[in-house]
Image: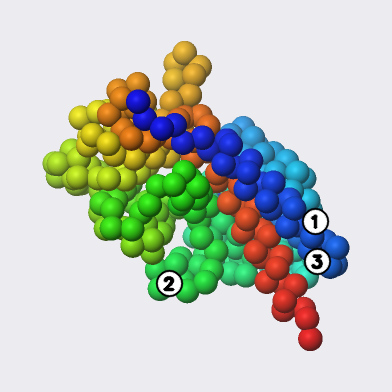
């Protein structure tokens, strides 16, 4: 039976490490802060925003919330972002996605100062990742690397297959696995003979967005399987992109849903907020 990669436990370990770090820096007079902007009242977004603010409170990061009405214009949102960009008391800025249709997501993301882009979505940070330069990395893929490392799973030289090519998960995941010296293949909806490709994987990352699509017919015996999906089934329970019951018996390690990748996303956001605060404090020094 597969090793179950416990994202809750690893996440809480990292949060405690961050909490201690923040406390130490506070004694040196360094403070950390995150501004969270939500436009509209999408219930899922409200839950995510609450989780992020609770994590801030636990670690000792100050957070401020901006709850803007659904009909907010792009210009109004950009004005707020510019104000926060110029505010030295704000280290990190996050606009919860999705935004309503009158607002262009890519315009908003590029408006956030790259030094405050704790989501790692700004082109400058995406470019830095692909060129091996320092910058903020998208939180979910960064969290997956931590899950692997802290579970004693090495990436170097492994066949890594990522299913999904989104800007937030698939593409940065591929870059990070490459940075760790994996041999990386990215599959997507137009990939031919998907099973032939995924069956080669030593490490398989599923970010397809379809409930239980990846069953044992996609997985090589002994593979490590990382499930990025989260879906609510008709019976009210949560499931991932991976059919856990069918895949767990053939995998050597697997992330459950819930309690696998999910908790890591907010944790890595907290990690980025701490980095942002440290960078800002260094800039302020003479
Ligand atoms: N919506 C879904 N995931 C995310 C995320 O990681 N960051 C932001 N800002 N919005 C999201």
Q: Is mark 3 within 8 Å of ligand 1?
A: no
Q: Which residue is mark 3?
A: 30
| Residue positioned most to the bottom | 286
Point out the tag, 2 or 1, that comes first from the N-terminus. Answer: 1
Q: Nearer the viewer, residue 16 or 229?
A: 16
**How many circles with numbers are drawn on the protein?**
3
Nearer the observer: mark 2 or 1; the answer is: 1
Question: Which disc, if any, is residue 136?
Answer: none
- Give the percent coordinates (x, y) of residue 282: 72, 76
Horizontally, residue 26 falls left or right of residue 92, namely right
- Give the percent coordinates (x, y) of residue 2: 36, 30
> What is the CA distance from the residue labelled 3 to the residue labelled 1?
9 Å
Q: Which quadrant of the view contains residue 81?
A: bottom right
- Crowdedness of circle 1 by 10 Å Cα count: few (<14), some, many (20+)? some
Label 3: state its secondary structure. Answer: loop
Q: Which residue is mark 1?
A: 23
- Give the percent coordinates (x, y) of residue 74: 60, 58
Nearer the observer: mark 3 or 1; the answer is: 1
Q: Is residue 252 above or below residue 24?
A: above
Q: Is mark 2 within 8 Å of ligand 1?
A: no
Residue under the image location 44 percent in, 16 percent down: 234
Residue under the image location 50 percent in, 67 percent down: 125
Asked whether the residues under the numbered discs 3 and 1 touch, taking CB atoms below 8 Å apart as contact, a structural biologist would say no
Q: Nearer the viewer, residue 131 or 34?
A: 131
Label 2: state its secondary structure. Answer: loop
Q: Is residue 29 above or below residue 250?
A: below
Q: Quadrant of the N terminus?
A: top left
Asked whether the residues under the numbered discs 2 and 1 touch, taking CB atoms below 8 Å apart as contact, a structural biologist would say no
Residue under the image location 39 percent in, 40 percent down: 226
Horizontally, residue 275 falls left or right of residue 208, namely right
Q: Which residue is mark 2?
A: 132
């Amino acid at each position: 039976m597969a090793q179950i990669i416990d994202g809750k436990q690893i996440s809480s370990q990292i949060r405690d490490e961050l909490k201690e770090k923040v406390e130490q820096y506070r004694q040196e007079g360094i403070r950390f802060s995150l501004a969270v902007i939500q436009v509209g009242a999408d219930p899922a977004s409200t839950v995510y925003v609450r989780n992020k603010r609770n994590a801030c409170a636990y670690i000792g990061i100050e957070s401020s919330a901006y709850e803007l009405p659904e009909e907010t214009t792009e210009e109004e949102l950009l004005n707020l972002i510019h104000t926060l960009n110029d505010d030295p008391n704000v280290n990190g800025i996050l606009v919860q996605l999705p935004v309503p249709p009158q607002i262009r997501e890519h315009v908003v993301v590029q408006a956030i100062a790259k030094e405050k882009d704790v989501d790692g979505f700004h082109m400058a940070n995406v470019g830095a990742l692909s060129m091996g330069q320092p910058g903020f990395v998208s939180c979910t893929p960064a969290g997956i690397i931590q899950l692997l490392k802290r579970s004693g799973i090495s990436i170097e030289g492994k066949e890594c297959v990522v299913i999904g090519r989104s800007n937030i998960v698939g593409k940065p995941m591929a870059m990070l696995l490459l940075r760790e010296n994996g041999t990386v293949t990215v599959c997507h909806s137009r990939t031919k003979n998907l099973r032939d490709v995924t069956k080669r994987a030593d490490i398989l990352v599923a970010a397809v967005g379809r409930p239980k699509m990846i069953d044992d017919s996609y997985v090589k015996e002994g593979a490590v399987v990382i499930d990025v999906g989260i879906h609510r089934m008709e019976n009210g329970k949560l499931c991932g992109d991976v059919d856990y019951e069918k895949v767990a018996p053939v995998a050597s390690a697997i992330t459950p849903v819930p309690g696998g990748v999910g908790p890591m996303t907010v944790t890595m956001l907290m990690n980025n907020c701490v980095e942002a605060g440290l960078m800002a404090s260094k800039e302020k020094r003479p």
